[in-house]
Image: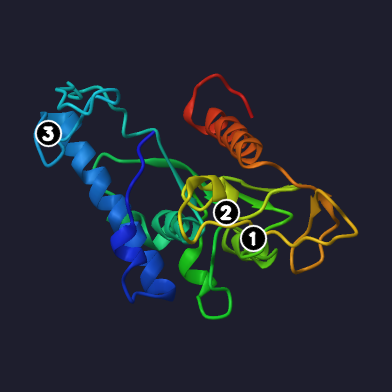
Amino acid sequence: MVSLSANGINASAVFNDENASARADLINRHLALWQQLTTSGRGGLVGVFRDAATGEPRHVGFRHRVDLHRVATLGHSRGGAGVTWQAADRNRAQWPEGVEVRAVMALAPAYNVMTEDVSAYEITKTPVAVVRGTCDGQVGREALAFAAEATAKSSAGFRQLEMPGANHNYFNTQWSPRSGQVPAWDDATHDAAHPGRCTDPGGSPYAPQLTEAAQRRAGAASLVAFLRCHLTDDGSR
């Protein structure tokens, strides 16, 4: 699994469809770097890898080691909109040569449903899954409806999951309170009459709130199950 930094986009004044497009472009540019690295052993990723334990530079031979015909993308919040945009039918031509995205998961995707054109996100050829917590204080259930509409004509499949007791920020280690980051907080809705339980501004039924670690474990389990269906040849569905 490879994680991309979109901090430059986060700090920019790019909004709505342009924001999703910028994130999709970041994904495609990074995939192009991997395509160059695995086919020729050259490119911008050469020499950038470091030992996880020591931080020292480490040579890793990736040539012919990465199967870019079995790529899956995952995005959280605005990243969820980005991976959906990147996989949209009309944007497939922008995928680097030799790259095939075979699965997309949008985790609590923050679509601007009032301003964004759902037809621009239409996906009919790539399996899509959307996960949202019932205690999400930032993304409402309209995100599920938006994704369902974008994939309504899909022959590849669409899955949606509402995770009881999950909020928005706990899926992300940097946005969770234990990170110590200034903007990190619990975005779920609480009520003194329901101790230890949470809901969302839309009034979902109260559910026992998941801890940061438990929510991330549940998210990871959902991701692994989805990827197992679409990136392996064992026939699991």
Q: Amino acid at mark 2?
A: Asn
Which residue is rendered at x = 29% and y = 23% of the image? 53
Tally of numbered tags: 3
**Mark 1 / mark 2, whichever is N-terminal:** 2
Q: Amino acid at mark 1?
A: Asp
Q: Which residue is mark 3?
A: 46
* Callout 2 crowding tier (Cα within 10 Å): few <14, some 14–19, many ≥20: many
Task: Give the number of the disc on residue 187.
Answer: 1
Residue 39 position by quadrant: top left
In the depicted structure, whether residue 36 falls above or below residue 137 = above
Which residue is rendered at x = 31% and y = 28% of the image? 67
Which residue is rendered at x = 36% and y = 42% of the image? 3
Q: Is residue 111 left or right of residue 54?
A: right
Q: Amino acid at mark 3?
A: Val
Q: Which residue is mark 2?
A: 169
Image location of residue 119, percent across then percent down: 51, 70
CB under 8 Å between discs 1 and 2: yes
Task: Report the residue that reaches farthest toward the right.
Answer: 193
* Callout 1 crowding tier (Cα within 10 Å): few <14, some 14–19, many ≥20: many
- Image quadrant where one finds the N terminus: top left
* Callout 3 crowding tier (Cα within 10 Å): few <14, some 14–19, many ≥20: some
In the depicted structure, whether residue 134 falls above or below residue 138 = above
Dot 1: what SS? loop
Q: Is residue 56 left or right of residue 205?
A: left
Alpha carbons under labels 3 and 1: distance apart: 40 Å
Closest to the camera, between mark 3 and mark 1, is 1
